[in-house]
Amino acid sequence: MCGRGNMEVYGARDANGNWVYFGITGQGLPIRQGQHGSRFDIQPLPGLSGFSTPTARGVEQSLIMQHGGAGGQGNLLNIRNSISPNNPNFAPLVTNGTSILRQNGY
């Protein structure tokens, strides 16, 4: 369930080194950084690229959940989840994402 594609998972940290945002892109990080503007500086997460969109969303959602949640639930600036908890594929995609994170040392 680790579909291959062009999606990459990235993160951003605050001045104290705390994670504040996680996202995915298929456009490349320089283009995505331009879209974010000066809100924060994004950085690649080693080993977390070359995924299909569903796989990348599972990894991103797992990271969001591990760091307090989206929509003001934790310290993240993510305003929404990558996958709706109402999505019937939520559990398997997040489980797969968590597995990928563990395999890559996250």
Image (spheres, rainbow, N blue to C red):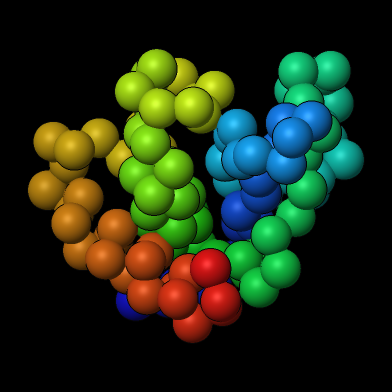
Counting from the top left corner in percent of width and height, residue 51 is at 55, 66
Where does the image place residue 31, in percent across and percent down from the top left? 83, 35
7 relative to 46 in the view: left or right: left
97 sits to left or right of 4:
left
Whether residue 32 is situated above or below residue 1 in the rendered picture: above
Q: Is residue 105 visible?
A: yes
State which quadrant residue 65 falls in.
Answer: top left
Measured as percent of width and height from the top left, residue 53 is found at 48, 54
Residue in the picture at 49% in, 27% down: 75
Q: Is residue 89 above or below residue 84?
A: below
Number of numbered discs: 0
Is 48 drawn above or below residue 27 in the view shown?
below
Image spot of residue 41 (x, y percent): 81, 33
Q: As drawn, is 94 to the left or to the right of 42?
A: left
User: Image point 59% across, 34% down: which residue?
Assistant: 21
Q: Nearer the viewer, residue 95 or 54?
A: 95
Camera sees residue 61 = no
Residue plotted at (45% across, 19% down): 79
Which residue sits at x=73%, y=41%?
17
Q: Quadrant of the N terminus?
A: bottom left
Is 25 displayed left or right of 71 in the figure?
right
